[in-house]
Image (cartoon, helix red, strand yellow):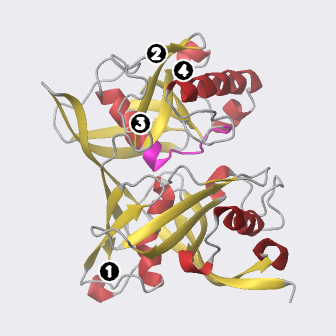
Amino acid sequence: MSQSSVPFLFMRGGTSRGPYFQRADLPEDLEDLSKVLTAVVGAGHSLNIDGIGGGAAVTTKVAMLSKSQDNWADVDYFFAQVKVDEEEVDFKPTCGNILYGVGPAAIEMGLVEPQGDETRVRIHAVNTGARVEAILQTPGGVLTYEGEARIDGVPGTAAPILLNFMDVVGSATGKLFPTGSPSDMIEGHVVTCIDVAMPMVIGKAEDFGISGYETREELDANSELMARIEKARIAAGEKMGMGDVSKSVTPKFALLAPARSGGTISARYFMPWQCHPTMAVSGAQCISSCTLCPGTIAEGMAALPEDIPAQMLIEHPSGEIGVTVDYENGANGFDIKSAGLLRTARLLASGDLMVPAKALT
């Protein structure tokens, strides 16, 4: 037989989508796993024509689930970011948008049983060690995707899913500011290197020669800007203790500008070689923390909420995303306790995905 079948769910999580597998159905060895996932996505072609990827970084993501080995959690969530144009897979980061599909997928797979009208699923993000609680709508003990929640970047409405992210500080580097400072001069630009849910390098849009209100298409077409961003990102990654990040999707990059549509701040988030069409969930947490923390490049750019938890609203190319940040800023310094976001997810398809036999050998 020239191909093998693997059971899967095809889901939208937030503003991303991709296949969700049971981890036990895939190779344990990461090199073998990479071969399978690049074949699944169709990596190596701009349209992912020989796989189910959608020709963009937000549609070449993979989630793998299993019963948790963590005493706190119900489900282990292992994430993979597959490249679009190259046959490469990055297992270092996690993905917050795809995480919104983990709770529903766990119920669909039989890993978690619904509990009453509302079900809480505790998720352990294997890649980063983060703990996340998902609150799902299960009226009468039945999972539903129907509802009135709306998120920018996705048409229509769906059932709301609330995620509460714990232990978000130092997700990859162990420190809020991996360089030891809230701001650094890197490649001629003052930036903030910060690690909250996702390690990021954040600069001011005007310092990079743009307004910060450009469309995704305008930014992707600006090759000079993208080259400067990548040069700064690679240098910052070294300074953050992450080594050579030239082939890694982390740290991510963002450029900030003052809000102009009633939000807290405006941001353009890079994945890192393309501008995100909306905003990554992990990126939203990190950008919100950067905006709240004294001494970063965002200081003075936004009118900050007085209440704690703070309701942050980040403007992005397709609209806005809200983040609730519980934090302290006292004698012991700035500390993020948790960050919560409301998004949606939907099951798009289920069945068997065909994998070429050569990818499984």
Element under disc 3: strand
Could you classify mark 4 by the number of other residues whose Cα lies within 10 Å: few (under 14), some (14-19), or many (20 or more)? some
Instruction: Assign the N terminus to one quadrant of the image.
Output: bottom right
> Can you give x and y, in whole percent of width and height, for residue 303 in the image?
29, 24
Give the image location of residue 36, x and y in percent.
72, 69
State yes or no: residue 142 in magenta. Answer: no
Please report the bounds of the magenta region as a residue range: 273-283
Numbered disc in front, either 2 or 1: 2
Q: CA distance from mark 3 to mark 4?
A: 20 Å
Q: Which amino acid is tagged 3?
A: Asp
The residue under label 1 is: 138
Q: Residue at x 35, y 33 (%)?
A: 176
Tell me where residue 63 sits by quadrant. bottom right
Residue under the point 56% across and 58% down? 16
Tag 2: Cα neighbours inside 10 Å, few (<14), some, or many (≥20)? some
> In terms of sequence position, does the residue under pointer 4 or pointer 2 come before the other?
2
Determine whether the residue tagged by mark 4 lies in a helix, strand or loop. helix
Can you say whether 357 is above or below 127 in the image? below
Horizontal side of 206 relative to 45 (left or right) equals left
Q: Magenta-highlighted stretch: main secondary structure?
A: loop
As measured in the structure, the alpha-carbon distance from the residue carrying label 4 to the one carrying label 1 is 43 Å
